[in-house]
């Protein structure tokens, strides 16, 4: 169980660092076309920033910023974006995941449509990886019993 | 039984080593792996996908179906952790 510890150094450093970590994660996702990186790596960095928030603030604060239901929904949405782009290509009379058919929707030439299709897919992967990272950490750190589910045991004072 | 296991292990290892003798040298440009489809990826990536990073275009475009499977594996791992570990309020007190 992760409780909030009153440590001004740790919580201040984390508060300063978390936005920059998330910004860097977005950079890694968006810049995957030109440098090492992409959805998996950026998603893991985003998930790590959320884990850092959980570690330094504790469950009681983290659950307001990152509700568990939202995490489950986000991981589904990530896979759905990926598969949705694939099925969209079928609807546009192409093969599954043939991004060049998206050129009609995006008003660019087929090569750039494939580039944008890769970007869309990477964003979906990033969502899924981020949410799953946080979800697995949450489950393992609490043993699966989330704080608001916990009831005081019988015979002990709450 | 220990002797039999040892013989089987040595035989299997010898077979595997014998199998590697036919493999092309490491980094051989004429090997089937680097002469069949790799040159096409290297030369046509920029024209086909307007993406300078060959790794990204192979990962998400040429082999996009594989990456969809990878994402599904990660999603399934997360869902499995939730299903196995997480307990709801009603089933908390057994």
Image (cartoon, helix red, strand yellow):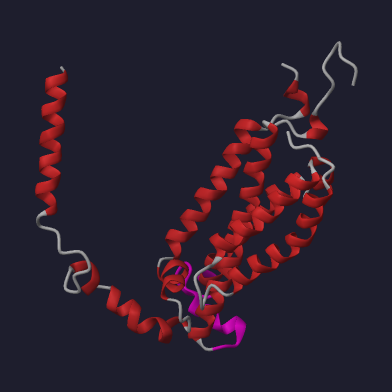
The number of callouts visible is 0
Frontmost residue, B86 versus B10: B10
- Residue B65 drawn above or below residue A115: above
Q: What is the quadrant of residue A150 in the picture?
A: top right
Q: Residue at x 14, y 59 (%)?
A: B23
In this rendered view, identify the residue nearer to me: A92 or A52. A52
Q: Quadrant of the N terminus of chain B?
A: top left
Viewport quadrant of the C terminus of chain B: top right
Image-quadrant location for residue B42: bottom left
Instruction: Give x and y (percent) for residue A26.
Output: 65, 68
Residue A139 in the image: above or below residue A13: above
Looking at the image, which residue sits at the far top?
A155
Do we see residue A37 in this rendering?
A: yes
- In this view of the protein, which residue sits in the foreground, B66 or A94? B66
Residue A80 seen in this snapshot: no
Q: Residue A91's spot in the image, x, y percent?
A: 54, 71
Magenta region: A90-108
Is A139 situated left or right of B35 in this image?
right
Q: Residue furthest front?
A: A9
Residue B84 image position (x, y, % from top left): 60, 31
Q: Tell me which residue sits at (24%, 71%) in the image.
A: B34
Q: Would you say A144 lies left or right of B67 here?
A: right
Q: In the figure, A105 relative to A148: above or below?
A: below
Quadrant housing residue B10? top left
> Residue A130 in the image: x percent, y percent?
63, 55
Residue projecting furthest to the right? A157
Residue at horizontal 9%, vertical 48%? B18
């Amino acid at each position: 169980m992760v409780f909030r510890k009153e440590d001004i150094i740790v919580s201040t450093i984390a508060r300063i660092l978390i936005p920059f970590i998330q910004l860097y994660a977005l950079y890694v996702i968006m810049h995957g076309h030109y440098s090492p990186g992409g959805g998996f790596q950026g998603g893991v960095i985003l998930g790590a920033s959320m884990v850092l928030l959980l570690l330094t603030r504790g469950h009681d604060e983290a659950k307001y910023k990152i509700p568990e239901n939202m995490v489950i929904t986000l991981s589904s949405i990530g896979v759905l974006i990926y598969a949705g782009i694939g099925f969209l290509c079928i609807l546009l009379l192409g093969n599954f995941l043939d991004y060049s058919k998206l050129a009609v929707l995006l008003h660019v030439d087929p090569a750039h449509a494939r580039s944008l299709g890769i970007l869309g897919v990477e964003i979906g992967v990033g969502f899924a990886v981020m949410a799953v990272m946080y979800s697995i950490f949450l489950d393992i750190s609490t043993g699966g019993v989330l704080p608001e589910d916990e009831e005081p045991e019988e015979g002990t004072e709450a | 039984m220990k002797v039999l296991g040892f013989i089987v292990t040595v035989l299997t290892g010898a077979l595997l080593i014998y199998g590697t003798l036919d493999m092309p040298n490491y980094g051989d440009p004429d090997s089937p792996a680097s002469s069949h489809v790799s040159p096409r990826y290297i030369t046509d990536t920029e024209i086909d996908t307007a993406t300078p990073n060959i790794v990204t275009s192979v990962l998400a475009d040429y082999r996009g179906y594989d990456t969809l499977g990878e994402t599904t594996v990660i999603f399934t791992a997360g869902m499995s952790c939730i299903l196995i570990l997480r307990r709801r309020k009603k089933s908390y007190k057994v």
